[in-house]
Image (cartoon, rainbow, N blue to C red):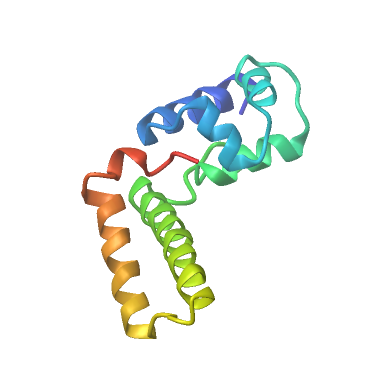
Amino acid sequence: MTHLELIVKIEARRKKLNITIVNLSKLSGLGTRTVNRFLAGEDVKLSTVEQITNLLGLDFAGNEMLTLKELQKKRAKEKALFMVSLVQGTSSLEMQGLEKNSIDTMLKNMEKEFLTGNYRNRLWVA
């Protein structure tokens, strides 16, 4: 696979997931300029390619390691866990930590909301 073919696969995947370049850079831990340079076909470190492809559920050759649905579920779970941890952290500081059942219910509801609800368009916002 050529460098250009990989870029085409990455761009197609990014657009299918509706991830902006800014969010792609934030979520992968790279600078926006670095991501833009890579997408423009310039040489970048292999670790840069690895970070971008991993985030998008692809391998180094641009082959799908996770389906779009699996990748979206993974992201929804990560984002829900982050949101619930904020609530739990604040509640614990106030000596009002939530029970495990409540946390599990919140996680399921938030995951569902990120996948199908009003926030599904914000799934990939960093």
Residue 61 coordinates in the image, percent (x, y): 59, 37
The one nearer the camera, 82 or 76, is 82
Q: Is residue 28 above or below residue 107?
A: above
Residue 118 coordinates in the image, percent (x, y): 22, 44
Residue appearing at x 39%, y 80% in the figure: 98
Residue appearing at x 31%, y 51% in the figure: 114
Q: Quadrant of residue 25?
A: top right
Residue 17 coordinates in the image, percent (x, y): 38, 36
The one nearer the camera, 119 or 6, is 119
Residue sticking out furthest to the left: 117
Q: Is residue 36 visible?
A: yes
Residue sticking out furthest to the front: 94
Q: Is residue 43 above or below residue 98?
A: above
The one nearer the camera, 51 or 31, is 31
Q: Quadrant of the N terminus?
A: top right
Residue appearing at x 38%, y 31% in the figure: 18
Horizontally, residue 72 falls left or right of residue 40, namely: left
Q: Is residue 58 above or below residue 15?
A: below
Q: Is residue 60 visible?
A: no
Q: Is residue 102 above or below residue 55?
A: below
Horizontally, residue 106 falls left or right of residue 77, namely: left
